Amino acid sequence: MNTRTVDVIVIGAGAAGMMCGAVAGATGQKVLIVDHARAVGEKIRISGGGRCNFTNLYCGPENFISGNPHFCKSALAGYSPQDFIGLVDAHGIAWHEKKLGQLFCDGRSTQIVKMLSEACEQAGNDILLDTEIKRVQKDGEWFSIQTSKGDFSAKSLVVACGGPSIPKMGASGYGYQLAEQFGLKIITPQAALVPLTFNGEIKESMRELAGVALPVRVKAGSITFNEDMLFTHRGLSGPAILQISSYLMPGQSITINLAPTKDLPTLLQSGRNQKPKLSPAGLLASILPQRLAQQIAKESSFIRLADMGDAAMQILAKRVHNWEVLPAGSEGFRTAEVTRGGVDTGALSSKSMAVKKVPDLYFIGEVVDVTGHLGGHNFQWAWASGVAAGRVIARR
């Protein structure tokens, strides 16, 4: 079988891979993008409830987790949220800010996929889908790959095949295998931005509250997030829980303030003085969803506020403002939005995403040990890291 030669091979037709291909091909580099999926940008398509939270206005290094918190700075500085917004605007895609700087398409996420596909097409990229990669190796200055649709060689190889989160979309740890093949260290991958699960009685109590949502302040160690939380049949979810899950270590508990903008001790004291016949459930229902208020009140044996002493009020206030729970685990990669960990950044150039000891080899996007907060930050990392590598390749 004849081997086809190109300038650049990109493994992965997702956000980072297509961005890199479009930038690298803009100066005439012949780029081949290969993916085992049947369509490009599948994670983009399902993101943001189908509307794609494509970036965040306030995206910065502080919104990322990595073994080296400084690594992401160069790429993010080189390609900002405003840069991507400019691209979106140029393609006539309407968008809006939902909250906290999170930008979504007014229409469907497929608009972003179409935009990137057109950029790759304009750059002369070839995209080979539904293709199994059987072997990757480097012979001298050239990389060669054997696939189910032929053999290819290139001077540069870009690995942009993400992590194992959401395996039903075809995600896998293949990028880590390639990294290890070339002698790179892998920071143990963990499910991130993922719902938490519980066991025993607490699971049953949460199951009874499934569907109840409310704004909370959740804390694990020194990390705190103020966002919405959702009770589920398995445990807890919602933005606040997804955010904290990225930081949570096995066996670590979380503390939840169920009414972060209220002062329950003062409300209880005032209620006892002014409405002594009011039940604890009745007072709690003024600051919490009714089902949650009723469940918490059941933990107390008091029928009226008038019957509650100061110690009982302190216990109830602690239950609301300082509820400590120990997760059994998480829903894992099955529902995780991203993967924490990945290719150790110590092996990469922060300016180009190139492997320091293997010339012309690059790792970009989720496969790298850079994990963003919820709210468009992971897409911004995909765009920025893809552009960082693409610009260097384009100058070759």
Image (spheres, grey):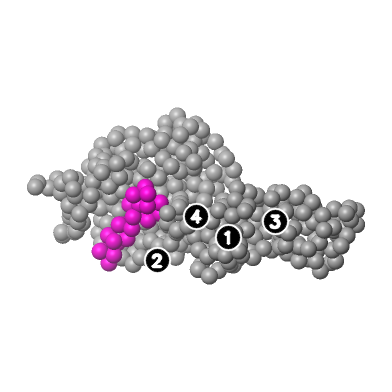
The residue indicated by pointer 1 is: 203
Q: Is residue 179 magenta?
A: yes
Badge 3: few (under 14), some or many (20 or more) residues near its Cα, within 10 Å?
A: some
The residue indicated by pointer 2 is: 188
Residue 84 in sight here: yes
The residue type indicated by label 4 comes to: Leu
Residues drawn in magenta? 160-183
Q: Are marks 4 and 3 in contact (CB under 8 Å)?
A: no
Q: Is residue 256 left or right of residue 337?
A: right
The residue indicated by pointer 4 is: 193
What is the x, y in percent for residue 260? 70, 55
Residue 280 image-quadrant placement: bottom right
Q: Is residue 326 left or right of residue 379?
A: right
Of residues 110 and 322, the one drawn nearer to the viewer in this rendering: 322
- At 25% from the left and 64% from the top, the residue drawn is 181
Label 2 vs label 1, nearer the camera? 1
Q: Earlier in the sequence, mark 3 or mark 1?
A: 1
The residue type indicated by label 2 comes to: Thr
Q: CA distance from mark 2 to mark 1?
A: 28 Å
The residue indicated by pointer 3 is: 295
